[in-house]
Amino acid sequence: MPSFDIVSKIDMPSVKNGLDGVKKEISTRYDFKGSMCEVEQQEDKIIIRADDDLKRKQVEDLIITHLTRKKVDTGALEFEKPEAASGNSIRQIVLIKQGVDREVAQKIVKAIKSSKSKVQTSIQGDEVRVSGKKRDDLQAAIKLIKELNIKHPLQYENFRD
């Protein structure tokens, strides 16, 4: 029985390379001279430290630009609210979302069931497995999911016949 998995994975080495580019640009740009702006990655989150809100916004734009250059889908980044930090500076945490959220998975399952297509879905942890009798049914399910316009980046992998 043909099947495939719907997953959401981010290439973490590409994220690290993109953040290295951001750090290099911060150290060389004239408008960051003498500022205490920095970016650091801790597992599944990025921490931005900046002098003021303008510099924080510039660093945020740099992160999006450099990660886009490295072909990382920036839809997986969740920018939290900036907060005051020590030394009259601003800190912002950016979460890197991996895996399909429970709500997104339920939305996908509900959409496939309401379409009356001949495929079965099951939520397996942070991924969704879709299986059916024909390859065409699975391709129709992929098309249906893409039409949902989910903001979270999704990949379709592990296709088996």
Image (cartoon, rainbow, N blue to C red):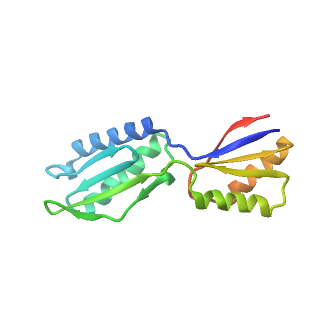
Q: Residue at x 19, y 59 (%)?
A: 51
Q: Position of residue 125 (x, y in %)?
A: 59, 48
Instruction: For the N terminus, give its image quadrant.
Output: top right
Q: Position of residue 142 (x, y in %)?
A: 73, 49
The reply, left or right, for residue 8 in relation to residue 25 is right
Tell how many labels: 0
Q: Residue at x 86, y 42 (%)?
A: 134
The reply, left or right, for residue 127 in relation to residue 52 is right
Give the camera-side residue of 105 and 8.
Answer: 105
Q: Is residue 19 above or below residue 56?
A: above
Q: Quadrant of residue 108?
A: bottom right
Q: Residue at x 24, y 46 (%)?
A: 29
The reply, left or right, for residue 107 in relation to residue 71 is right
Q: Residue at x 17, y 52 (%)?
A: 36
Give the camera-side residue of 19 and 28.
Answer: 19
The reply, left or right, for residue 117 in relation to residue 28 is right
Q: Position of residue 154 (x, y in %)?
A: 60, 49
Instruction: For the C terminus, give its image quadrant.
Output: top right
Q: Position of residue 13 (x, y in %)?
A: 43, 35
Q: Is residue 61 above or below residue 161?
A: below
Q: Is residue 7 above or below residue 91?
A: above
Q: Is residue 77 above or below residue 54?
A: above
Q: Quadrant of residue 93?
A: bottom left
